[in-house]
């Protein structure tokens, strides 16, 4: 009975709120050292701790930045970008024409050289002058050198026994002589090769010390010592000059085509070859 009375009394006190102001003696976790004191002493510390540090927030954009980026502004900026100039009208059509491509690929020049390749292996602007353009020849000897040098291997279908270094005016003169002065003398048995005894060489005339520079030293001279015919015969100036009318006739035909023609009987220095050069004289060609 006592137990029932006590239980009833407790329910009555509980219902009436008698325990509302009673101290709470339930166990609590111990506070961290210094934490409670900081929070209680600084009421705004909780708000500051929960806030994101200012350094982690992006800076605000300048006022008016976004509205400035408009389609008109993009077009204006794009127009300021440098662009290549348009090709002239019709340029592509001309460049792609087959004959223009072949012609452009065939032309090759060297600085300071007047020789122009018209097709592979041709020089001096003439398809019948075969050889190659070479670099200008210079020399420490005053008067020597060839500013427009070419190395010739054949003219008008006639081979040279060795490549001859001369200039283009001399090469053209040689071609004209072969066509109009030499071959007409050997119609039935044409010449197929010229035996070249000398071409460019920086030396005095007739190799005489103290003499003027020879035309050989300027790339304007060529010495021919013999001819090879189509049937294989070889005619040399040294052995066949006296008995060969065609050789003498061809030699005479060179006068005027070249500025100077010298051969057997001229001065004693050309008994075994014909000397041709393109020197120019006020009084005309020098032929002996």
Image: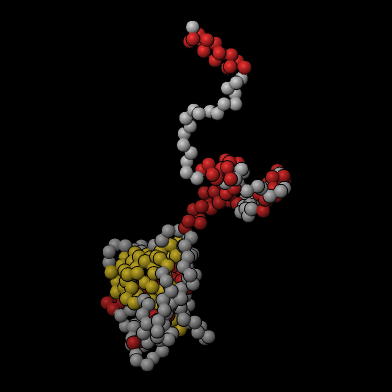
Percent across and percent down for residue 10 are: 54, 15
Could you say which is closer to the camera, residue 132 or residue 189?
A: 132
Q: Residue at x 52, y 10 (%)?
A: 5
Look at 55% across and 13% down and name the residue there: 9
Q: To which quarter of the image does residue 207 belong?
A: bottom left
Residue nearest the viewer, comparing 142 with 71: 71
**Image position of 150 (left or right of 51):** left
Q: Is residue 71 visible?
A: yes
Write the residue at 32% across / 70% down. Answer: 162
The answer to whether 222 is drawn above or below residue 78 in the figure is below
Question: Residue 103 in the image: x percent, y percent?
Answer: 50, 56
The answer to whether 153 is drawn above or below residue 52 in the figure is below
When the figure is inspected, residue 213 is found, relative to residue 232, above or below; the finding is: below
Q: Quadrant of the C terminus?
A: bottom left
For this orientation, the residue located farthest to the front is: 2
Say how many tags the image has: 0
Q: Residue 258: where, in percent of width, then height? A: 45, 77
In this view, the residue farthest toward the bottom is 210
Q: Is residue 75 left or right of residue 18?
A: right
Relative to the observer, which residue lies in front, 233 or 108? 108
Tell me if residue 85 can be seen: no
Q: Identify which residue is drawn at 39% across, 68% down.
A: 152
Please state which of residues 40 and 242 is positioned toward the viewer in this rendering: 40
| Coloration of the structure image | secondary structure
Q: Residue furthest top?
A: 1
């Amino acid at each position: 009975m006592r137990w029932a009375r006590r239980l009833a009394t407790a329910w009555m006190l509980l219902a009436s709120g008698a325990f509302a102001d009673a101290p709470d003696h339930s166990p609590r976790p111990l506070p961290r050292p210094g934490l409670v004191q900081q929070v209680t002493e600084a009421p705004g510390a909780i708000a500051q701790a929960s806030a994101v540090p200012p350094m982690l927030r992006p800076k605000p954009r300048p006022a008016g930045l976004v509205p400035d980026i408009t389609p008109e502004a993009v077009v204006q900026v794009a127009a300021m970008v440098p662009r290549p100039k348009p090709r002239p009208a019709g340029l592509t059509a001309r460049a792609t024409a087959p004959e223009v491509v072949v012609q452009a690929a065939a032309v090759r020049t060297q600085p300071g050289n007047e020789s122009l390749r018209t097709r592979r292996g041709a020089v001096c602007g003439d398809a019948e002058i075969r050889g190659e353009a070479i670099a200008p020849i210079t020399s420490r000897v005053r008067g020597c050198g060839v500013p427009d040098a070419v190395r010739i291997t054949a003219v008008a279908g006639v081979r040279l026994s060795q490549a001859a270094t001369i200039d283009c005016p001399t090469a053209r003169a040689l071609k004209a002589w072969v066509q109009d002065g030499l071959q007409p003398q050997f119609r039935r048995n044409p010449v197929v090769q010229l035996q070249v005894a000398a071409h460019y060489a920086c030396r005095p005339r007739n190799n005489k010390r103290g003499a003027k520079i020879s035309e050989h030293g300027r790339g304007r001279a060529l010495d021919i010592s013999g001819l090879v015919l189509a049937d294989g015969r070889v005619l040399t100036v040294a052995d066949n000059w006296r008995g060969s009318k065609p050789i003498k006739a061809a030699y005479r035909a060179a006068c005027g085509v070249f500025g100077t023609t010298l051969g057997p009987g001229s001065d004693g220095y050309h008994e075994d070859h014909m000397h041709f050069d393109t020197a120019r004289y006020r009084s005309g060609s020098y032929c002996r």
